Image: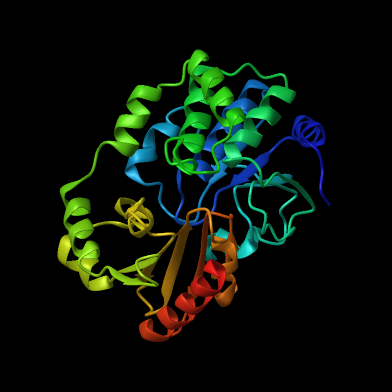
């Protein structure tokens, strides 16, 4: 059942022993949302905890600085920035059928929770968490502000992606005034890369191919590249956007080979194509300009189907 911001805030205020779930392969938005909510619940003297099926990437370690070490049997479970049960991953699968509230911004949200707060016009789930925390009458501290800013900045590409709205900037301004450490966050998340990341970026660029007179571009990240460079999963953030950055490209596709031989696919588009519609060819989805899917098809077959879907969108 869909609920409002006011109802979501009331649910949280009326509960205790709250477990907050982030999605697998966690990014800045799911973690920023989770920890912002955690600290807001602390402010209301609630017992709460954040868990994620995968390790937190080192660049987001600062988000958990104020977390308390607690153990309890949850009476209320919240998922943040998690559009489907599958995104919780195997490690959190025991909670998949027990989610009481989901707060999300993906239009393809499957409605798996008992109650769902979703707004696909929000640039990030953290925009919704900002509104919910305000409705809970919790002051936005510097720590909460840094968490929310992290999610908004990462999901908006540091305010460059088309999902960025005037409200996105207004919220970011409020968070900066509240004490968000935006200079350090922007530097660490957007202006700092490891040597391994630079090495794998070079190799990915070598795989670039084009179609439709340069309107479509695609690249591949292989397991061999990861092995040769020593790059970790957390260091691949942003690689999916590389093909779309090229002048004249309207559809950028990145295929990332998984350990089991399957491919995780990311699609980024300009103004003339729906990324979610392209990913639907493999049952995926997401946003108008950024979406993803997975496939067990061989690489050549996967590319063929994705190109066909991309060409259809461009028509």
Q: Image check: 213 left or right of 152?
A: left
Q: Position of residue 210 (x, y in %)?
A: 32, 70
Considering depth in this image, is 313 or 55 the residue closer to the camera?
313
Tell me if I can see residue 74 in this picture.
Answer: no
Instruction: Give the residue drawn at x 34%, y 37%.
Output: 189
Residue 230 picture quarter: bottom left
Q: Is residue 130 positioned above or below 277 on the image? A: above
Q: Position of residue 144 (x, y in %)?
A: 53, 25
Q: Is residue 157 positioned above or below 301 on the image? A: above
Q: Image check: 253 left or right of 275?
A: left
Instruction: Give the residue drawn at x 63%, y 52%.
Output: 106
Tell me if I can see residue 12 in this picture.
Answer: yes
Q: Is residue 260 positioned above or below 186 on the image? A: below
Residue 243 picture quarter: bottom left
Q: Image check: 231 left or right of 213?
A: left
Q: State the quadrant of the C terminus.
A: bottom right
Q: Position of residue 84 (x, y in %)?
A: 64, 61
């Amino acid at each position: 059942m869909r609920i409002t911001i006011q109802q979501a805030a009331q649910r949280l205020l009326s509960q205790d022993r709250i477990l907050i779930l982030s999605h697998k392969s966690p990014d800045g938005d799911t973690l920023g949302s989770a920890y912002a909510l955690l600290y807001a619940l602390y402010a209301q003297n609630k017992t709460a905890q954040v868990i994620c099926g995968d390790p937190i990437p080192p660049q987001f370690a600062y988000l958990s600085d104020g977390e308390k070490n607690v153990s309890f049997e949850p009476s209320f479970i919240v998922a943040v920035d998690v559009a489907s049960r599958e995104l919780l991953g195997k490690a959190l699968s025991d909670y998949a059928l027990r989610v009481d509230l989901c707060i999300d911004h993906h239009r393809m949200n499957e409605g798996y929770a008992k109650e769902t707060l979703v707004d696909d016009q929000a640039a990030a789930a953290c925009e919704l968490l900002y509104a919910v925390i305000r409705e809970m009458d919790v002051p936005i501290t510097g720590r909460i502000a840094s968490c929310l800013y992290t999610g908004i900045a990462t999901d908006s590409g540091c305010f460059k992606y088309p999902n960025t709205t005037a409200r996105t900037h207004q919220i970011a301004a409020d968070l900066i005034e509240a004490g968000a450490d935006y200079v350090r966050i922007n530097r660490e998340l957007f202006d700092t890369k490891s040597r391994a990341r630079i090495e794998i970026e070079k190799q990915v660029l070598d795989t670039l191919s084009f179609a439709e007179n340069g309107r479509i571009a695609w690249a591949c990240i292989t397991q061999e590249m990861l092995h040769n460079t020593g790059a970790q999963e957390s260091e691949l953030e942003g690689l999916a956007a590389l093909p779309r950055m090229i002048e004249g490209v309207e559809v950028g596709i990145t295929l990332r080979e998984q350990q089991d031989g399957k491919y995780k696919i990311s699609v980024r588009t300009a103004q003339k194509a729906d990324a979610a519609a392209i990913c639907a060819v493999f049952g995926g989805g997401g946003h108008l300009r950024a979406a993803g899917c997975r496939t067990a098809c061989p690489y050549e077959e996967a590319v063929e189907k994705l190109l066909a879907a991309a060409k259809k969108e461009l028509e």
